[in-house]
Image (spheres, rainbow, N blue to C red):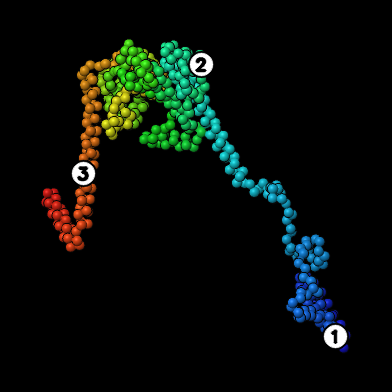
């Protein structure tokens, strides 16, 4: 009966397995494992593992028992798993990644991992290329200006640039008056013109009669930073208060004005005696102070707003000047003296596109706020726009005007001596400004004295108050409060 029952159970299980196989293979696996355990339990095949014997003697280690082996990982392809072989779609173990060295980037990455770098790196390279191109073009433009104007400065001055003077470089006698030309010496471009910023270059010249020294400043576009340049141009176009960027050259010639003995340095008494004897035979370099200018009409409003010295003048058109230029002067006599025929020819040759302004002044650019800032410093200032060409020949039209501005102190020393009435009127304008500065200075000093007196009075009060008792301090403070109230009442009554 037992065998018959088992056969019946086996047939029932087989039928169930068939149905499970057709329904779902996963149920077939679960059912087969469950039935196998059930049959083994019926025949006594399933026995629980015996419990390990207790350690009888804890003083001696038990060498019979070996440590349990650690599990070994094996890939699905190498382990003989019949279930995984029968149903490969249910094999969920991850595929192991092959080990590579850390420096084998090409095995650990793909081109899609560098999408951000592919955008950023070309942009950085483009910015660097534009920056280098802009600085090089500015340098070429400054060198083109130097090639056209440095020979003029070398003809007019004994020393040009920031290196040694001509005589020191050639080793000639310093007492000799002979000045060699540019072809007699070899000077590098860095010693003639200096790059102060990526958009500004400067040069310097000295060693000339009636002229202490001359400074030249060349201002160029910010080609190395096109975003900033475009923004400045847009803002200058939209707002009148902001001037658009431009490329120009400005030379400032500082006149001696009869102060050669004070400005020329000497190293010994022998040089001082030689200097005195040399200056005795020279013409006096001094001339009457004035502010006079020839200005392009597009520059007049900006100059009045930016320069204090030009704001002292009156603007008038002159029949001898081109229609695009005007005169700004303190007196008509000054205009008739300084507006020469040679200057008019130079202005016409320079043209409307290149000329900006020519100023003869003795006043500061910014309005003085102290008496020291109001001291006259006579100088000649010329500003010219730079052409777009990088060739030195593009400056041929402006070189005559540039050379005239260098020689203008000679003309001023010879002719700028006006009638006493004109000189008196010009001096009165400056004296009024000086009086205003003195009055403002006296007001500041009076305010400082008042604050100092209040400070000392407060210190004496605090010292006195510390030496009093509590009751005496209370009475002292009450008296102060009453005095303050009386003063306040008097002020209110005066206002009423």
Query: Would you say residue 304 is visible in this rendering?
Result: no
Give the alpha-carbon distance from disc 2 to disc 3, as whole Å.
Answer: 65 Å
Neighbor class of circle 1 (other Cα within 10 Å; few <14, some 14-19, many 20+) is few
Q: Earlier in the sequence, mark 1 or mark 3?
A: 1
SS for dot 3: helix
Q: Which residue is more in the foreground, 135 or 191? A: 191
Q: Is residue 372 left or right of residue 475?
A: right
User: Looking at this rendering, what residue extends furthest in the bottom direction?
Assistant: 1
Give the quarter of the image for residue 58: bottom right
Nearer-N-terminus badge (2/3)? 2
Q: Which residue is mark 2?
A: 185
Residue 270 placement (x, y as % from top left): 37, 16
Instruction: Point out the residue furthest to the front here.
Output: 269
Q: Name the element at disc 1.
A: helix
The residue nearer to you, when weighing 380 against 124, is 380
Residue bearing the label numbered 1: 5
Q: Quadrant of residue 96?
A: bottom right
Q: Nearer the viewer, mark 1 or mark 2?
A: 2
């Amino acid at each position: 009966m037992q065998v018959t029952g088992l056969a019946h159970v086996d047939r029932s299980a087989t039928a169930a397995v068939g149905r499970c196989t057709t329904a779902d293979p996963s149920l077939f696996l679960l059912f087969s494992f469950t039935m196998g355990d059930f049959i083994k339990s019926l025949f006594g095949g399933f026995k629980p593992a015996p419990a390990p014997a207790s350690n009888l003697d804890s003083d001696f280690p038990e060498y019979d028992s070996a440590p349990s082996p650690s599990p070994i990982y094996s890939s699905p392809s190498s382990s003989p798993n019949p279930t995984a072989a029968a149903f490969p779609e249910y094999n969920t173990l991850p595929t192991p990644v092959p080990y590579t060295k850390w420096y084998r980037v090409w095995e650990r990455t793909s081109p899609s991992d560098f999408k951000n770098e592919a955008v950023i790196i070309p942009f950085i390279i483009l910015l660097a290329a534009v920056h280098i191109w802009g600085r090089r073009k500015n340098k070429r433009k400054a060198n083109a200006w130097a090639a056209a104007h440095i020979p003029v400065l070398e003809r007019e001055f004994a020393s040009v640039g920031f290196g040694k003077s001509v005589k020191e470089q050639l080793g000639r006698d310093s007492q000799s008056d002979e000045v060699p030309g540019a072809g007699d010496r070899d000077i590098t471009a860095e010693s003639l013109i200096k790059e102060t910023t990526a958009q500004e270059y400067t040069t310097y010249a000295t060693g000339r009669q009636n002229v202490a020294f001359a400074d030249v400043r060349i201002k160029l576009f910010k080609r190395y930073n096109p975003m900033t340049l475009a923004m400045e141009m847009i803002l200058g176009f939209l707002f009148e208060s902001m001037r658009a960027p431009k490329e120009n050259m400005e030379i400032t010639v500082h006149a001696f004005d009869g102060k050669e003995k004070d400005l020329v340095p000497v190293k010994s008494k022998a040089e001082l005696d030689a200097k005195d004897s040399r200056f005795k035979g020279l013409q006096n370099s001094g001339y009457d102070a004035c502010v006079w200018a020839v200005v392009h009409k597009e520059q007049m409003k900006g100059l009045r707003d930016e320069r204090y010295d030009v704001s002292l003048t009156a603007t008038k058109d002159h029949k001898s000047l081109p229609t695009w230029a005007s005169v700004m002067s303190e007196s008509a006599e000054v205009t008739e003296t300084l507006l020469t025929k040679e200057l008019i020819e130079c202005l016409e040759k320079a043209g409307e596109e290149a000329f900006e302004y020519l100023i003869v002044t003795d006043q500061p650019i910014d309005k003085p706020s102290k008496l020291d800032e109001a001291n006259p410093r006579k100088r000649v200032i010329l500003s010219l726009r730079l052409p777009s060409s990088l060739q030195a020949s593009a400056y041929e039209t402006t070189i005559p005007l540039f050379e005239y501005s260098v020689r203008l102190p000679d003309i001023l020393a010879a002719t700028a001596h006006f009638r006493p009435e004109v000189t008196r009127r010009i001096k009165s304008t400056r004296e009024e400004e000086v009086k205003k500065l003195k009055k403002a200075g006296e007001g500041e000093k009076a305010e400082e004295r008042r604050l100092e007196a209040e400070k000392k009075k407060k210190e004496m009060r605090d010292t006195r108050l510390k030496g009093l008792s509590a009751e005496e301090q209370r009475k002292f403070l009450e008296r102060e409060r009453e005095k303050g109230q009386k003063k306040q009442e008097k002020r209110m009554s005066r206002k009423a």
